[in-house]
Image (cartoon, grey):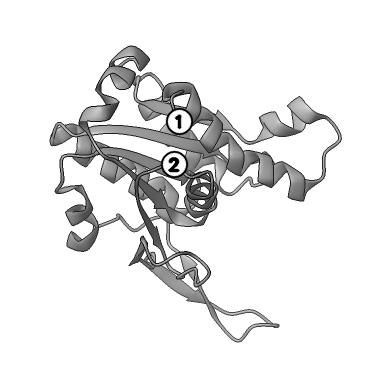
Amino acid sequence: MDNELLNKEIQDNSIHFIALGSVGCDALEIIYNKGVKAKYSYICYLKRKHLPVDIDFIYFIPPGKIESDELIESFKLPDMNVELVVPDEILALFNEDHRYILLSGVGDYTGTFMTDKLSQFLIENNKDFLVICRIPLSFENIKKPYAEVIRLKFQLMSNFRIFESDMMFKKYGNIKVKDAFEKLDKEFYNIFLEIFPQY
């Protein structure tokens, strides 16, 4: 699927942005606030109460195991060894004849496995879709191996855009981490505009 085809057919399909996990949600908020006319949904373990009611929230908590900590009595750590079973409620998001745009940060459970499983589902069902996702920063070592699996699997497919978080530090030099994350979130919107410049 090349850019010319995407641009030619854009008026034939409604766009539906779907954020996968917290990184995707941050990007979704920026795109929504830019005024892009579309349907919006986000899949996450925590509802963002400040978001407008027309952005659909789908609750999803990753499978995990309870860990103990001296400061926190217990907390749930996502178990990356447990295969994702996509709930029917999430699959139902793709019932319409829309152009689906998935937004995610790969490396954590929801971003990694939802990107993988939903992309496969969309391919198998001949859906019109685009995935924009980012690779975690170098210091997020625990996430890198899972992110690399997604990169290797999908990087040659034309309807995938995968970008490196580290690029912001290289591009802008001595930049604060907070500012870098803001620019990373905006990069999803920039990539969207490259493909759909009319927005």
Q: Which mark is residue 176?
A: none
How far apart are the alpha carbons under marks 2 and 1? 7 Å
First-in-chain label (2 vs 1): 2
Residue 13 position, x and y percent, is 22, 34
Amino acid type of the residue that numbered disc 1 sits on in the rendered structure: Tyr
Residue 69 position, x and y percent, is 64, 79
Amino acid type of the residue that numbered disc 2 sits on in the rendered structure: Val
The extreme bottom residue here reads 73
- The residue that mark 2 highlights is 36
Q: Crowding at label 1, few (<14), some or many (≥20) Cα neighbours within 10 Å?
A: few
Residue drawn at the location 47% of the way across and 37% of the way down: 133
- The residue that mark 1 highlights is 199
Name the foreground residue: 35 vs 83: 35
Residue drawn at the location 68% of the way across and 33% of the way down: 166
Q: Crowding at label 2, few (<14), some or many (≥20) Cα neighbours within 10 Å?
A: few
User: Is label 1 in a helix, a strand or a loop?
Assistant: loop
Residue 170 position, x and y percent, is 76, 27
The answer to whether residue 82 is above or below residue 158 is: below
The answer to whether residue 122 is above or below residue 24 is: above
Q: Give the quadrant of the C terminus.
A: top left
The extreme right residue here reads 174
* Dots 2, 1 in contact, CB < 8 A: yes
Direction from residue 114 to residue 96 in the image, left or right:
left
Residue drawn at the location 55% of the way across and 30% of the way down: 190
Count of numbered badges drawn on the protein: 2
Name the foreground residue: 139 vs 185: 185
Direction from residue 176 to residue 111 in the image, left or right:
left
Name the foreground residue: 177 vs 138: 177
Residue 144 position, x and y percent, is 56, 41
Residue drawn at the location 67% of the way across and 46% of the way down: 182
Q: Give the quadrant of the N terminus.
A: top left
